[in-house]
């Protein structure tokens, strides 16, 4: 049997921005994430984490190098097909939650499949099931202003999982939460990982990153260390 390709690969990814001189946010990043992994990408401000998130999430294209999702190189796809792949195969969780204020928790989650041809009844049932999974079965009809920060982040996580994505990218998911709630959200990510989800968490918090099975450290646009490959960052 042919082995499945990594869920996500970055191959010699460079991202430059116009300037005098040009700014290189990423300077040749290699990264491979296999199915079922739970990975932290950690680094200080200016290390390239946000740019790397944009590359991994197919939100932007590299200047040079390749990004592959489930073995498909995004450079070979049109913008329309990249957008379709991003909507179907990548889930996003953001620090700011990005929930719609006038909608209930179940309606906010169900919007994640709004443009994928799934019937309203199936979207709603899937949303209900996921809200139970993230511990919000009693809060289905509550709107965001009736939920705590941790509960809002749970809604956002449920929405990210709605379409059964190949990978979930969580960008500073505990950044707006108190320490107790942060611990609960990290535990939820561990639980989802145990159930088979592939998750990459982007953070500046090294203590949080240390709790995950694998940590990739960024510095000045390069991978400075990777616990999956102890030779990275070691002088030749």
Image (cartoon, rainbow, N blue to C red):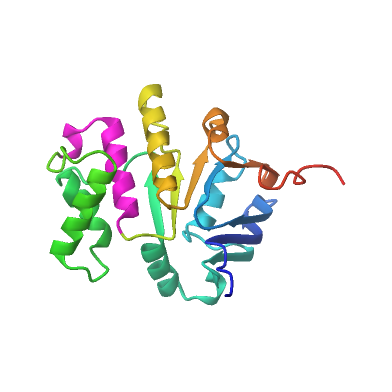
Horizontally, is 85 left or right of 209 in the view?
left
Horizontal arrangement in the rendering, residue 145 relative to residue 84 (left or right): left
The residue that appears at 56% across and 41% down in the rendered structure is 213
186 up-or-down from 166: above or below: above
Q: Is residue 195 visible?
A: yes
Where residue 86 sits, quadrant-wise, is bottom left
Whether 58 is among the magenta residues is no
Specify start and end residues of the magenta stretch as a single range: 143-162
Q: Residue at left 27%, top 38%?
A: 152
Q: Is residue 135 left or right of residue 188?
A: left
Q: Is residue 69 above or below residue 212?
A: below
State the residue in front, 186 or 23.
Answer: 186
Residue 22, given in percent of the width and then of the height, sits at 67, 53
Quarter the N terminus occupies: bottom right
- The structure residue drawn at horizontal position 42% and vertical position 35%, both measured from the top left corner, is 186
Let me know if residue 22 appears in the view: no
- Give percent across and percent down for residue 232: 75, 46
Q: How far across and down, in percent of the image, does residue 118 sit? A: 22, 68
- Name the outermost residue toward the right: 236
Residue 160 part of the magenta-drawn span: yes
């Amino acid at each position: 049997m042919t082995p499945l390709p990594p869920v996500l690969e970055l191959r010699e990814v460079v991202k430059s921005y116009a300037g005098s001189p040009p700014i290189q946010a990423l300077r040749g990043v290699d990264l491979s994430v296999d199915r079922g992994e739970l990975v932290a990408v950690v680094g200080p401000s200016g290390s390239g984490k946000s740019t790397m998130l944009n590359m991994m999430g197919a939100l932007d294209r590299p200047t040079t190098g390749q990004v592959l999702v489930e073995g498909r190189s995004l450079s070979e796809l049109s913008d329309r097909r990249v957008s379709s792949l991003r909507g179907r195969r990548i889930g996003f969780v953001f620090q700011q939650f990005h929930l719609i204020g006038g909608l209930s928790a179940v309606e906010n989650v169900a919007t994640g499949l709004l443009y994928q041809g799934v019937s309203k009844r199936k979207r709603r049932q899937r949303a209900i099931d996921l809200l139970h999974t993230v511990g919000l079965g009693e809060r289905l009809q509550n709107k965001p202003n009736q939920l705590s920060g941790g509960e809002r982040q749970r809604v956002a996580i449920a929405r990210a999982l709605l379409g059964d994505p190949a990978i979930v990218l969580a960008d500073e998911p505990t950044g707006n939460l108190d320490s107790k709630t942060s611990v609960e959200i990290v535990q939820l990510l561990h639980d989802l990982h145990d159930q088979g989800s592939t998750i990459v968490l982007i953070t500046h918090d090294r203590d949080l990153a240390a709790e995950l099975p694998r940590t990739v450290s960024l510095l000045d646009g390069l991978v400075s260390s990777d616990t999956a490959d102890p030779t990275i960052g070691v002088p030749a």
